[in-house]
């Protein structure tokens, strides 16, 4: 059984994971990008099952291990395939200059180039922190 202190920390991490995942990664566009890269739908169900749990108990450890493994797959697939492909499609590069481009387009591309990598990094940090507790 986990100590009360560990239970508080793990509950906090699960809450943060839930907020981050549902807020930034659990949407049709992102899931369709995962599927285009042969991401297994069952992994998404593992993530949802893990995030539905409110408190960490040893009896549910398999759900957490499966969910963490699935989140690590999301992170790896995103870094390896999705980020590079989207950067190419959105023409996010220091070498790309288009004078006919609107400022709004430029702002949106720059926003993407910072927010998705940041959210992936934050997801990875939370997963690592959660693994240490388990």
Image: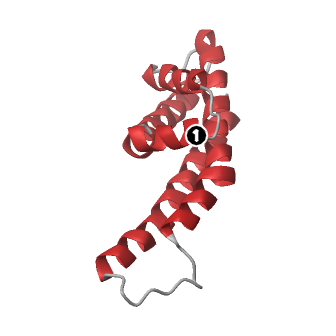
- Which image quadrant: the C terminus? top right
- Residue 129 lies, with reference to residue 116, above or below; the image says above
Side (left or right) of 80 relative to 101:
right
- Residue 102 x/y as whole percent: 31, 81
Residue in view at x 56 percent, y 15 percent: 57
Q: Nearer the viewer, residue 82 or 89?
A: 89
Q: Nearer the viewer, residue 119 or 55?
A: 119
- Residue 2 x/y as whole percent: 61, 21
Q: How many marks?
A: 1
- Which image quadrant: the N terminus? top right
Q: Residue furthest bottom?
A: 99
Side (left or right) of 119 relative to 81:
left
Q: Residue furthest top?
A: 59
- Residue 43 lies, with reference to residue 27, above or below; the image says above
- Residue 22 lies, with reference to residue 134, above or below; the image says below
Q: Secondary structure at mark 1?
A: helix
Q: Nearer the viewer, residue 96 or 7?
A: 96
Crowdedness near tag 1: few (<14), some (14–19) or many (≥20) residues, C-alpha within 10 Å: few
- Residue 114 x/y as whole percent: 49, 67
Kindly identify which residue carries mark 1: 36
Q: Which color mode does the image show? A: secondary structure
């Amino acid at each position: 059984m986990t100590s009360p202190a560990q239970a508080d920390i793990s509950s906090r991490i699960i809450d943060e994971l839930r907020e981050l995942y549902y807020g930034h990664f659990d949407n049709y566009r992102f899931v369709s990008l995962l599927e285009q890269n042969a991401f297994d739908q069952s992994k998404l169900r593992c993530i949802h099952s893990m995030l539905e749990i409110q408190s960490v108990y040893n009896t549910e450890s398999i759900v957490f291990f499966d969910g963490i493994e699935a989140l690590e797959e999301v992170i790896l697939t995103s870094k390896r395939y999705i980020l590079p492909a989207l950067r190419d499609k959105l023409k996010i590069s220091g070498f790309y200059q288009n004078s006919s481009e609107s400022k709004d387009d430029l702002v949106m591309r720059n926003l993407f180039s910072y927010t998705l990598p940041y959210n992936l990094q934050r997801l990875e940090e939370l997963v690592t922190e959660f693994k240490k507790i388990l």
